Amino acid sequence: MILGMTPFTLFHVVLSLIGIAAGFVVLSGWLRSDRRSGWTALFLLSTFATVITGFLFPFSGFTPAIGVGIIATVLLVLAIAALYRYQLAGRWRAVYVVCAAASLYLNVFVLVVQAFAKVPALNALAPTGAEPPFAIAQGLVLLAFCAFGYLAVNRFHPTTV
């Protein structure tokens, strides 16, 4: 096991990190009205695969992680439909940007949760996840995504789909 993870957990984490990295490339493209088709496909595919593999971990009962996974699934389905089925026509452009950005946010949200749970220095600051450092970190991430999401909706107007 690498870093104390099972191969499946490592696969899930790698998918998540690929999705986050590709998502930031896509987000930067939206801010310049650049679709970045290849990066977009990688972002949507790896993020969707992250969500699906997340449902394959053993669980008993409904957990916050399951709730986040359900929301992320709905957002990704809407983003994929807006992009590939509806070709970003009319309001589907905004639906795509909002849903894709929100799914990226959820992936980063989980990254922050896992960082505070697994990184000793961060865990010492917020061992239960209810302490101010955790809330501040998550609040800053949310504010950043709201700001960049707003800018992306207003700036992303690709001429070709």
Image (cartoon, grey):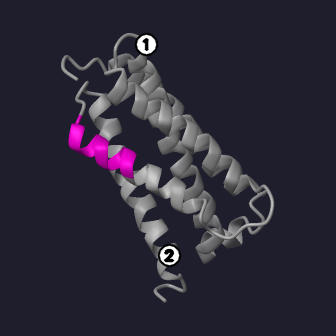
Q: Residues within 10 Å of mark 2 (few under 14, many from 20)?
A: few
**SS at badge 1:** loop
Residue at mark 1: 91
The numbered mark, 1 or 2, whose residue comes first in the sequence reads 2
Q: Residue at x 31, y 28 (%)?
A: 31
The amino acid beneath tag 2 is Phe
- Count of numbered labels shown in the rendering: 2
- The correct choice, above or below, for 93 with respect to 41 in the image is above
Which disc number belongs to residue 8? 2
Q: Nearer the viewer, residue 153 or 79?
A: 79
Q: Residue at x 42, y 29 (%)?
A: 81
Asked if the magenta segment contains residue 96, the reply would be no
Q: Residue at x 56, y 43 (%)?
A: 72
- The correct choice, above or below, for 51 with respect to 71 in the image is below
Res. 89 in view: yes
The amino acid beneath tag 1 is Arg
Q: Residue lying farthest top?
A: 90
Q: Residue lying farthest bottom?
A: 1
**SS at badge 2:** helix
Disc 1 from disc 2: Cα separation: 38 Å
Instruction: Give, as a single range, the part of the protein colored magenta.
Output: 36-45
Asked if the magenta segment contains residue 38, the reply would be yes
Residue 57 rendering spot, x and y as whole percentages: 62, 68
Residue 115 rendering spot, x and y as whole percentages: 58, 65
Residue 130 rendering spot, x and y as whole percentages: 79, 57
Specify whether 147 is left or right of 44: right
Res. 148 in view: no
Placement of the C terminus among the 4 image quadrants:
top left
